[in-house]
Amino acid sequence: MKKILIINGEPFQDRTATGITLKNIFNIIPKTDLRFIHISKLYPDLEYLDNVFSYYKDTVESKTSKSIPLESKARRVTQNRIIEFAKKELRNWDDLRKARFSTKIKQYIIESEAQIIYSCLGSLKVISLVLQAQKILNCKVVPHFMDDWKSVIFSDKRFIFHKLRLKNQLYILFKNVVNGLAISESMTLQYKKEFKIPFFFVMNSIPDEQIKELILNDKHTTKKFLYTGGLHLNRWKSLLMLCEAFHVIGQEHRLSIDIYCPENDKDIFENYFFKFNFIAFRGHVPSVKINEILSEADVLIHCESFDNYTRKYTKLSISTKIPLYLKEGKIILAFGPEEIESINYIKRNDAGVAISVEEPNLLIKTLLKEVFVNNNISRIRMNALTLFKLNHSYSSIKKKLELAFN
């Protein structure tokens, strides 16, 4: 494998979907071949990779550095929305400026001896760094689109200058791109037409040895549902719709729902679910314990928002948790608009129960039919395991990366 310089918004870490996905993808590449520059305030996992350059600190981070503490619950809940909006607005306008290029970061890039620059891009600042690093190294760039950010990041009319600069920067960038990576099959096809180069479907990957064997007997008298991941992007609204339906279904069927989400989401959204006595908010789950938690559930829930703006953002993406769910060989309940790739991916591969109806009574009837009395569950669960092996195992991802990084 060639030497790779990763330039990204977020570093390797376990607090965000991107950080987790990056760790899993690059776990199959020798760490001696990797260098990383990030522009996030997040603290990187230096046990995973101990040679990481922080753009804002303008230095290589070491294991002796202090981790950034988590915010207190009081601060998370009472944070002033006006101040946060102002900060976001300033970040957007600051994004127009060319990234500063210090002597230290230039030296770090030279010493990397990288033959490939990998980046999820995501902002003008990251693209600016990639372009400057590419000039120094004279190497090819492999972009990895993990969502359709370029279509929505500057959708507001006041960001016309941002849109024009983004279009120009991408045009310059793709002069040195011979192939790219995309997080879903749908995005791969669309971007292949748009950029006129090959794209490979690469997303969150998991070791082959973690694939579970299919066990068909139901060991619980109460059907145990499980939701893991963030409730942002209005996913909480879809989950709430499901819970309203389960509230009615629960009069005839015993069920429980455990929700594992970031502490910040728990603080914000838990009160919306207080009336449901079958729900338990568990907060954040460490990545080392996720497999144990998944193994105890009967049905694994994934939700996507029906909100029009959010649908544009998530349309071509697949959630990080989907491979985790698939490898369990359990019932996957995917609830959201049918055009969203996370939902459609499950539906077209018959790897779970995909439901897109919003009308309450019809939703109840559909859940009863598809989740509680479905005679095809064993076939669906086997399809989930097959799909995981095909697209999400380390062995399958390694082949695609070898082609992309060739």
Image: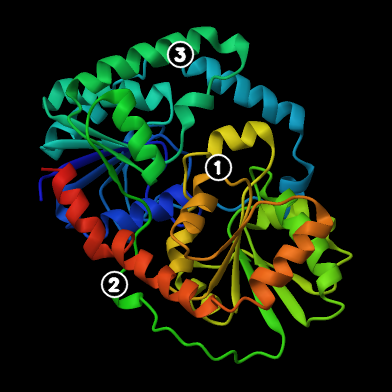
Mark 3 vs mark 2, CA separation in Å: 43 Å
Q: Residues within 10 Å of mark 1 (few under 14, many from 20)?
A: some
Circle nearer the viewer, 3 or 2: 2
Label drawn at residue 208: 2
Q: Residue at x 40, y 23 (%)?
A: 125
Kind of element beneath mark 1:
loop
Residue 179 picture location, percent across and down:
21, 34
Left or right of residue 172, residue 280 in this image: right
Kind of element beneath mark 2:
helix
Q: Residue at x 77, y 56 (%)?
A: 240
Please tell me which of labels 3 and 2 falls first in the chain: 3
Mark 3 vs mark 1, CA separation in Å: 33 Å
Q: Residue at x 62, y 45 (%)?
A: 337
Left or right of residue 248, residue 9 in this image: left
Q: Residues within 10 Å of mark 2 (few under 14, many from 20)?
A: some
Left or right of residue 252, residue 121 in this image: left
- Asked whether disc 3 touches disc 1, contact meaning CB atoms under 8 Å apart, the reply is no
Residue 272 picture location, percent across and down:
83, 55
Q: Which residue is mark 1?
A: 339
Nearer to the camera, 5 or 310: 310
Nearer to the camera, 360 or 130: 360
**Three-letter code for the amino acid on which mark 3 is drawn:** Leu
Q: Which residue is mark 3?
A: 96
